[in-house]
Image (cartoon, rainbow, N blue to C red):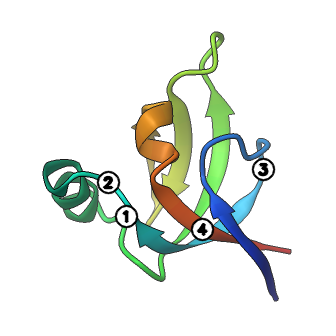
């Protein structure tokens, strides 16, 4: 079951979410797609760096670190 749409940035550790869209510049968008962060993919927030940037997520069986500005452009639906 999923709930409201939001962005990946700022989600608490342990949050499971499904990617619903990516609103970033074309080069960054393409780079995220190449790393497996595509629409419909499930991801989990693993941890934040001590100063809050970057954010580490688990996606497709591996860990990926994103800058907060990148995570703010990743639209997700939270999975309960």
- Badge 4 marks a residue whose secondary structure is strand
Give the residue at mark 2: 24
Q: 10 Å neighbourhood of mark 1: few (<14), some, or many (≥20)?
A: many
Front tag of 3 and 4: 4
Residue ranking furthest to the bottom: 1
What separation in Å lies between label 1 and label 4 (alpha carbons)? 11 Å
What separation in Å lies between label 1 and label 3 (alpha carbons)? 18 Å
Q: 10 Å neighbourhood of mark 3: few (<14), some, or many (≥20)?
A: few
Nearer the N terminus, badge 1 or badge 3? 3
Say which of 41 and 71 sits in front. Answer: 71
Nearer the N terminus, badge 1 or badge 4? 1
Give the residue at mark 1: 37
Q: Is residue 4 above or below residue 29?
A: below
State the residue at coordinates (65%, 48%): 45
Give the residue at mark 3: 14
Say which of 57 and 22 sits in front. Answer: 22
- Badge 1 marks a residue whose secondary structure is loop
Give the residue at mark 4: 76
Nearer the N terminus, badge 4 or badge 2? 2
**Can I make out residue 16 in this image?**
yes
What separation in Å lies between label 2 and label 3 (alpha carbons)? 24 Å
């Amino acid at each position: 079951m999923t709930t409201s749409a939001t962005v990946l940035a700022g989600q608490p550790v342990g949050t499971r979410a499904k990617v619903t869209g990516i609103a970033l510049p074309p080069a960054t968008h393409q780079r995220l797609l190449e790393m497996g962060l595509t629409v419909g993919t499930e991801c989990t927030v693993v941890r934040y760096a001590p100063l809050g940037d970057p954010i580490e997520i688990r996606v497709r069986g591996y860990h990926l670190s994103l800058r907060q500005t990148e995570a703010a452009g990743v639209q997700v639906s939270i999975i309960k």
